[in-house]
Image (cartoon, helix red, strand yellow):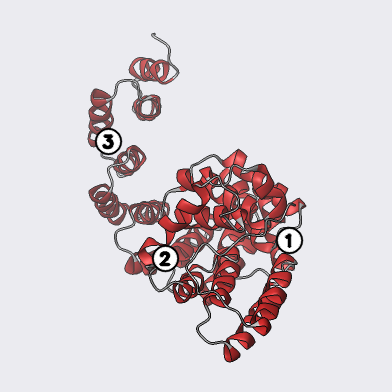
């Protein structure tokens, strides 16, 4: 990597003291060696002798910027230049990085990584990704590929995200990158690979409720239900009020036939978040599995009030059918098909219902429509 020795772009008075220059030289030498902690310790010591010296604060700001610690970076840069407002910090960075005179920009890669992190955290992954385009970032800044992968995940580009994370893993990335790579694998339904990555992350010291929840999710789809339930229970010990973990544990219990436990977990999850339509839908389906159709129908109705997604409406129709309300169920399908005649899933459900009623001819027509045939 080519290092560029640059001037402080912030305002600072000219310091004449030889011993201060020695402090700064030592700090900059440590910074070039990426010995950030040692450099920060040296700056702290120097400030006891030379308080309020802008160059020392500026060097600390550079280090914190490279480490992605924005609050500390802004604080130190502001101490170096009181005229710099925190609200203008990102604009200032962008001005630096967009100036192609390399004599002005110190640690250009650090600035690019910092900007990408900022825009990812503020909900603009497309803009964040633009700052990660220079190839040298991926070689010199281990966190750049991780941030790139997170941007791609947020944009739904899961294959590219997985590739970015796995390159980062192979170039010595930390356990958090293994975890992120596992998330990308889950998005691609590569459950076995995801599980291995989560386990590797655990072996390297990564922990927490989210890891256990996602590990349980992998195990659930691999059919390892007892292990999945244990992961969810351990995750709940760390985050007892997480309705998503409770919902996942409920689904796992239901899959194991432990319906009473599942229903209890669903009720608690809904108490914690009564406006989660997917959670309430799953609760309704569990009530159906328990044969409690009237209660299930009430939950289906509430679900549709929250979200009129097609799958939720169809689940309600299936509930009506199982209650013996076949005319009402058929009316739901017909209404859906009037709104969207090309909806193959609804035609298939309608065919099943008609077949159960012995209406073979009508059922065959619906089945053909579900398969995209004309007759």
Residue 221 seen anywhere in this rendered image of the structure: yes
Q: Which one is closest to the eye, mark 2 or mark 3?
A: 2
Residue 234: image location, x then y, percent: 58, 72
Residue 52: image location, x then y, percent: 50, 83
Residue 44: image location, x then y, percent: 61, 85
* Residue 75 left/right relative to 349: right
> Which disc number belongs to residue 243?
2
**Along the viewing direction, whichever of 123 and 100 lies nearer the viewer:** 100
User: What SS does tag 1 mark?
Assistant: helix
Label 2 vs 3, first from the N-terminus? 2
| Total residue callouts | 3
**What is the spatial separation of the Cα atoms under label 1 and label 3, in whole angstroms?**
48 Å
Which residue is farthest top?
375
User: What SS does tag 3 mark?
Assistant: helix
Q: Residues within 10 Å of mark 2 (few under 14, many from 20)?
A: many
User: What SS does tag 2 mark?
Assistant: helix
Which residue is identified by label 1? 200
**Which residue is depicted at the point 54% across and 76% down?**
57
**What is the spatial separation of the Cα atoms under label 1 and label 2, in whole angstroms?**
27 Å
Q: Is residue 22 above or below residue 301?
A: below
Which residue is identified by label 3? 329
> Which disc number belongs to residue 269?
none
Q: Residues within 10 Å of mark 1 (few under 14, many from 20)?
A: some
**Which residue is depicted at the point 37% across and 18% down?**
360
Label 1 vs 3, first from the N-terminus? 1
* Residue 309 left/right relative to 187: left
Residue 372: image location, x then y, percent: 43, 15
Label 1 vs 2, first from the N-terminus? 1
Quadrant of the rendered structure where residue 220 is? Answer: bottom right
Quadrant of the rendered structure where residue 268 is? Answer: bottom left
Q: Is residue 239 above or below residue 320?
A: below
């Amino acid at each position: 990597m080519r290092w560029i020795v640059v001037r402080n772009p912030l305002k600072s008075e000219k310091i004449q003291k030889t011993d201060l220059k020695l402090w700064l030289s030592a700090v900059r030498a440590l910074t070039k060696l990426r010995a950030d902690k040692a450099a920060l310790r040296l700056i702290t010591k120097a400030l006891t002798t030379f308080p309020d010296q802008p160059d020392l604060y500026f060097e600390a700001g550079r280090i914190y910027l490279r480490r992605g610690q924005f609050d500390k970076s802004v604080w130190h840069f502001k101490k170096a230049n009181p005229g710099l407002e925190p609200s203008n910090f990102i604009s200032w960075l962008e001005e630096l990085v967009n100036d192609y005179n390399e004599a002005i920009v110190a640690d250009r890669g650090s600035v690019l990584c910092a900007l990408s992190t900022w825009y990812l955290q503020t909900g603009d992954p497309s803009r964040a990704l633009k700052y990660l385009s220079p190839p040298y970032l991926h070689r010199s800044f281990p966190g750049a590929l991780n941030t790139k992968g997170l941007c791609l995940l947020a944009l739904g580009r899961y294959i590219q995200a997985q590739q970015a994370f796995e390159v980062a893993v192979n170039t010595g990335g930390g356990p958090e990158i293994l975890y992120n790579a596992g998330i990308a694998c889950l998005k691609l339904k590569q459950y076995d690979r995801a599980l291995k990555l989560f386990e590797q992350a655990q072996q390297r010291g990564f922990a927490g409720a989210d890891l256990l929840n996602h590990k349980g999710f992998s195990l659930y789809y691999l059919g390892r239900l007892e292990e999945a339930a244990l992961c969810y229970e351990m995750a709940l010990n760390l985050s007892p009020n997480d309705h998503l973990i409770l919902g996942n544990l409920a689904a796992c219990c239901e899959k194991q036939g432990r319906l009473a436990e599942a229903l209890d977990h669903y009720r608690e999850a809904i108490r914690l978040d009564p406006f989660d339509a997917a959670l309430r839908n799953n609760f309704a389906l569990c009530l159906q599995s328990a044969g409690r159709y009237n209660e299930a129908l009430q939950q289906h109705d509430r679900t549709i009030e929250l979200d009129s997604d097609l799958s939720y409406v169809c689940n309600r129709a299936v509930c009506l059918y199982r209650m013996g309300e076949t005319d009402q169920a058929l009316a739901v399908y017909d209404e859906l098909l009037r709104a969207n005649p090309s909806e193959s899933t609804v035609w298939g459900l309608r065919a099943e219902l008609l077949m159960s009623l012995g209406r073979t001819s009508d059922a065959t027509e619906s089945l053909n429509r579900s398969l995209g045939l004309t007759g």
